[in-house]
Amino acid sequence: MTVVSGAERLLVVDDEPTVRELLAATLRFAGFRVSTAATGAEAVASAAGSPPDLVLLDVMLPDLDGFEVVRRLREHHPVPVLFLTARDRQADKITGLSLGADDYVTKPFDLEELIARIRAILRRTTGRRTGLLTSGPLVLDPDGHQVTRDGEPVRLSPTEFRLLRYLMENAGQVVSRAQILDRVWQYDFGGDTSIVDTYVSYLRRKLDAGHPKLIHTVHGTGYVLREPRR
């Protein structure tokens, strides 16, 4: 997996289920955290509850059009917006950009180019390094080989670091011991996955001391990393 950014949260707004789910799956694979909405009203409500780092927004929606969604979002949240739409008239582009949208991409589009445009907007607007992974109180810097919890550094061995990175890349998803073994160790232990349990226990001791638990056991399956409940 190539991690483009794990720190940023994206909201994909499109009324076509196929397009919406394709985008969400692609962006999650790229390392982003993604939520979706099928209508303008859903988008406004979602952003009000938890403002994303960027909204990917169709213009043609079944209730509010994308332009009105931007107006309503901007009343409360200075959230960056990338229009992603089949509306390719110059007048529509001018309208969208005049409302303060950060980019305007027309369908059909190239997924790699779209991700590059997203990264460019996030570099301008978040001021954060791309490549960071976050999950609740955890921040992992793959390039600097550093991990913090609530801003405090956590010292990890190389194997512990790779294990945590894999769990954070799949935060909220249950991964099996066999999957972890394949991705973190990358060689055959003869079907013995007990090494995974051992290193998960190491991680828990270092991450969870005095804090709510982050890595949860799913009995008979594997493990999942979840943000602590507030």
Image (tube, rainbow, N blue to C red):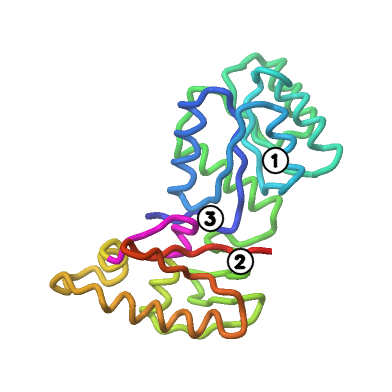
Q: CA distance from mark 1 to mark 3?
A: 21 Å
The question of residue 9 being in magenta is answered with no
User: Is residue 30 shown left or right of residue 44?
Assistant: left
Under tag 2, what secondary structure? loop
Query: Which circle, 2 or 1, is nearer the viewer?
Result: 2
Query: For mark 2, does the 10 Å Cα neighbourhood hold few (<14), some (14 to 19), or many (20 or more) residues?
Result: few
Q: Position of residue 205 (x, y in %)?
A: 49, 85
Residue at image mark 3: 5
The question of residue 174 being in magenta is answered with yes
Q: Earlier in the sequence, mark 2 or mark 1?
A: 1
Q: Position of residue 8 (x, y in %)?
A: 61, 53
Q: Please name the residue shown 31% across and 75% down the image.
A: 196
Under tag 3, what secondary structure? loop
Q: From which residue to which does the magenta span run? A: 167-177
Query: Which circle, 3 or 2, is nearer the viewer?
Result: 2
User: Is residue 93 shown left or right of residue 161?
Assistant: right
**Badge 1 amino acid:** Ser
Q: Position of residue 160 (x, y in %)?
A: 40, 78
**Badge 2 amino acid:** Pro
Residue at image mark 2: 228
Q: CA distance from mark 3 to mark 2?
A: 21 Å
